Amino acid sequence: MLVGNKADLRHLRAVSTDDAKAFAERENTFFMETSALESLNVDNAFTEVLTQIYRVVSKKTLEIGDDPAALPKGQTINVGGRDDVSAVKQVGCCSA
């Protein structure tokens, strides 16, 4: 998904809407412009991303069928334990 941010700052635009749409079409991706200031499409952008993820995952699940051996194998990523977080907090700028 391609998201054009800060659509409210039209006078500072570096890429035209038409160019962005054309790029998104060439790359076979969804395009949307957003502006948090004007509350334009911010929620819609998140909803669209989640909808597209759901569609892709659902399609892959249907292609796999009922064969559990065909399920993709995930990879475990260790992002640190509880002790790691405590150590970071102790060294931070605001600790006593």
Image (spheres, rainbow, N blue to C red):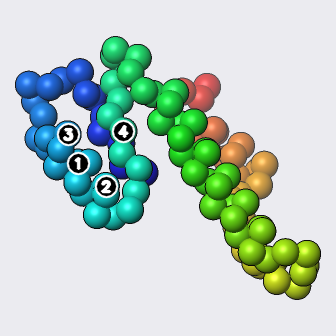
- Which quadrant holds the C terminus? top right
Q: In this view, does 18 lie above or below 29?
A: above
Q: What residue type is labelled 1?
A: Ala
Q: Which amino acid does label 2 sit on?
A: Ala
First reached walking from the N terminus: tag 4 or tag 1: 1
- Residue 92 appears in the rendering: no
Judging depth in this view, the residue of 81 and 63 nearest the camera is: 63
> Callout 2 environment at 10 Å: few (<14), some (14 to 19), or many (20+)?
some
Q: What residue is at 33 percent from the left and 24 percent from the top?
A: 35
Q: Is the C-beta separation of discs 1 and 3 under 8 Å?
A: yes
- Could you give the CA–CA distance between mark 2 and mark 4, rounded to whole angstroms? 9 Å
Q: Is the C-beta separation of discs 1 and 2 under 8 Å?
A: yes
Q: Which amino acid does label 4 sit on?
A: Met
Q: What element carries label 3?
A: helix
The answer to whether residue 51 is left or right of residue 6 is right
Q: Where is residue 36 in the image (x, y as percent from the top left)?
A: 38, 21
Q: Which amino acid does label 3 sit on?
A: Thr
Q: What element carries label 1?
A: helix
User: Outermost residue toward the left?
Assistant: 11
The residue carrying mark 3 is: 17
